[in-house]
Image (cartoon, helix red, strand yellow):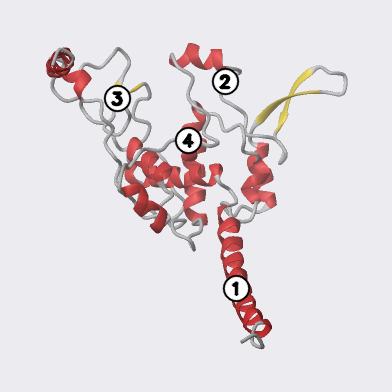
Amino acid sequence: MNIQRPIFALVLAGSLAAMALPASAQLTEQVPPPRLKWSFAGPFGKYDQAQLQRGFKIYREVCANCHSMDMLSFRNLADAGGPGFSEAQAEAVAAEYKVKDLDDLGNPIERAGRLADHFPAPFANELAAKATHGVAPPDMSTLAKARSYSRGFPWFVFDMVTQYQEHGPDYIAAYLNGYKDAPKGFVLPEGGHYNEYFPGHTTAMPPPLQAGQVTYDDASPQTAEQYSKDAAAFLMWAAEPHLDARKRIGFQVMIFLIVLAGLMYFTKKKVWSAVH
């Protein structure tokens, strides 16, 4: 009885403390983003080249002003399963960039980009990025894999059966559309912006996309919702550029294993047929 009383007192004190928290501390639970339909979802899904090209245009015109993509090279734009650029088109894109390099004498120079070059970062280093934005914007190379959210039990069990792996793109698209006015009682820090889907709901990045901001070459709607989906799809490809090949090889392996299992079964019956 002497042990139970202090435990009960601690629980009661914790409950009262939680009730006394300000609204800004209570509204920090992450809201799960809505599930969207993606061309690359499921075991037979693959990237939509037109969508990847639109997403690349958004990255170049909007995201690249602050975010680097250190693991992506210009030559990747012409890889199979990617945006579908030809090698000549990828070379033309690379030539539009200025890349810092050294000449034959070791002197620093600037030259036009080449296929083998990585996408140049918008800032010289992390300190320069922090000096401009207060915090260094994250590299986007693997953002679609790094950004995710927990669906909890029993949903993660269903995800294994349905092969739901689009947590990152769903989150990125929701985040880009999640800017709202802060609810009453929520205190935003200086320079912060309220985002419904960001953990803690306070993000340093202002809303990056508005309707009509980027001009598409096709008939796709030029809305913030479409921009966010296209950008998220492009970031998914940047994080997993060989997704199409992985799924194709995986399907071939499954067919091989089924045929092998059948051959092994009939071989076993043949070997043991004479044994009574």
Residue at mark 2: 123
Mark 2 and mark 1: Cα distance apart in space: 55 Å
Where is residue 134? Give x, y as percent.
Answer: 43, 13
Residue 210 seen in this snapshot: no
CA–CA distance in space, label 1 to label 4: 37 Å
Rendering coords of residue 150 (x, y %): 35, 39
Asked if 216 appears above or below 113 in the picture, the reply is below
Q: Is residue 271 among what the camera can see?
A: yes
Q: Earlier in the sequence, mark 1 or mark 4?
A: 4
Mark 2 to mark 3: distance in Å? Answer: 27 Å
Q: CA distance from mark 3 to mark 1?
A: 51 Å
Q: Is residue 255 above or below residue 272?
A: above
Residue at 30% over, 44% down: 153
Q: Measuring 68% from the left and 37% from the top, which residue is drawn there?
A: 95
Q: Residue furthest front?
A: 276
* Residue type (three-letter) at the residue carrying disc 1: Ala
Q: Which residue is mark 4?
A: 146
**Amino acid carrying mark 4 in the image:** Ala
Q: Earlier in the sequence, mark 2 or mark 3?
A: 2
> Residue 261's mark?
1
Nearer to the camera, 120 or 153 = 153
**182 and 253: which is toward the camera:** 253
- In the picture provided, is 71 more to the left or to the right than 208? right
29 or 38, nearer to the observer: 29
Mark 4 vs mark 2, foreground winner is 4
**Which residue is identified by label 3?**
200
- The image position of residue 243, as x and y in percent, is 56, 53
